[in-house]
Amino acid sequence: MLLLGELAMLPSDMSVREWVAHAGLDPKKWESGTSVNAPERTGEIGNARIRRALYMPAHSAIRYEPRVGAFYEKLLRRGKAKMVAVVAVMRKLLHAIYGMLKHGRDFDGEKFYATPETAPSTS
């Protein structure tokens, strides 16, 4: 409910990229002093209530939605830290919510992440 309340307050003409930036889930370049080439990270800028409201649903989705779990596991296999992978799931969930609200459809795991065995072949 908290998430829907926060998202309902956003202007209706915002794009999904603007939603992600508003929530603070987009990686930003971080430079401070001698840390000129530091890796990108999400910062404290953005709506913390949206991030908080997405955190536990991201964990539940990783555990109980097979496609979300597959996406999370793929990130871990690529060497991402667990928290980085959770934030990536949160960001992708926000994208999914945007699409669901915009098109009036239910969640579709296939659109969230097409696993290699279900992806269309290019041959």
Image (tube, rainbow, N blue to C red):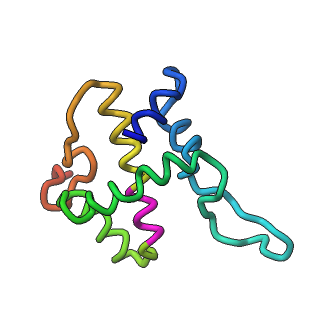
Q: Is residue 56 visible?
A: yes
Residue occupying the point 61% across, 63% down? 41
The residue positioned 42% from the left and 41% from the top of the image is 2
Q: Is residue 110 left or right of residue 102?
A: left
Please report the residue visible at 22 percent of the width from the left and 53 percent of the height from the top: 114
- Where residue 121 appears, x then y in whole percent? 16, 53
Residue 23 percent coordinates (x, y): 54, 45
In the image, residue 67 lies in the stretch drawn in magenta: no
x, y percent for residue 3: 42, 41
Which residue lies most toward the right here?
33
Horizontal and vertical percent for residue 20? 52, 43
- Considering only vertical position in the picture, is 7 above or below 108? above
Q: What residue do we see at 20% from left, 34% from top? A: 106
Numbered label tally: 0
Instruction: State the extent of the magenta-drawn residues as a range.
Output: 83-89
Q: Would you say the magenta stretch is mainly helix, strand or loop? A: helix
Is 68 rendered above or below residue 36? above
Question: 105 or 74: which is nearer to us?
Answer: 105
Q: Quadrant of residue 96?
A: top left
Residue closer to the observer: 63 or 9: 9
Among all residues in the image, which is located at the extreme front?
Answer: 1
Q: Is residue 123 visible?
A: no
Horizontal side of residue 54 vs 112, given as left or right: right
Quadrant for the N terminus, please.
top left
- Left or right: residue 39 versus residue 6 is right
